[in-house]
Amino acid sequence: MANTYCESCMMPFVKDPGPRESERYCSLCFKNGKLCYEGSDLKEFQRVCYESMVRRGTNKFMARLYTFMIRFAPRWKNRR
């Protein structure tokens, strides 16, 4: 069964601006055959995601909620 959300940022694939190159990651996290954020710092990744969401017009409260949820993504589960 295929995932319905990004394993890095938890974005539902139905919200992905696409096109996706990977079955596991959204088009914002995975480009040109690799992850866009290659680091391993969860807090830094959350900051980058929050700023990107706000720039794209996401309500700041919702961006904080979505950013909090990233910690539960498979990519970050063991890095908390």
Image (spheres, rainbow, N blue to C red):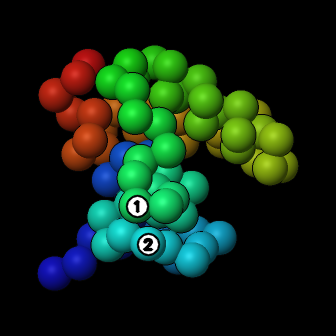
- Residue at horizontal 71 percent and vertical 31 percent from the top: 51
Percent x, y of residue 18? 59, 74
Which of 62/9 is in front? 9
Mark nearer the N terminus (1 vs 2): 2
State the CA–CA distance, disc 1 to disc 2.
7 Å
Percent x, y of residue 76? 28, 34
Q: Which residue is mark 2?
A: 21
Percent x, y of residue 6? 39, 58
Instruction: Sort mark 1 into few (<14), some (14-19) or many (20+) by Cα contacts within 10 Å.
Output: few
Residue furthest to the bottom in view is 1
- Residue at horizontal 38 percent and vertical 19 percent from the top: 41
Amino acid type at circle 1 is: Gly
Q: Is residue 64 left or right of residue 70?
A: right
Which of 39/78 is in front? 39
Instruction: Sort mark 2 into few (<14), some (14-19) or many (20+) by Cα contacts within 10 Å.
Output: some
The mark lying in front, picked from 1 and 2, is 1
Secondary structure, mark 2, is: loop
Amino acid type at circle 2 is: Glu
In the picture shown, does residue 39 fall above or below 30?
above
Q: Is residue 37 left or right of residue 63?
A: left
Percent x, y of residue 78? 16, 28
Which of 24/59 is in front? 24
Q: Which residue is mark 1?
A: 33
- Residue at horizontal 53 percent and vertical 35 percent from the top: 67
Toward which corner of the image does residue 73 lie, by quadrant?
Answer: top left
Q: Which mark is residue 12?
A: none
**Quadrant in the picture for the N terminus:** bottom left
In the picture shown, does residue 66 fall above or below 21?
above
Asked if the residues shown at circle 1 and circle 2 are in contact, with their CB atoms under 8 angstroms apart, the answer is yes
> Is residue 69 in view from this perspective?
no
Which of 47/36 is in front? 36
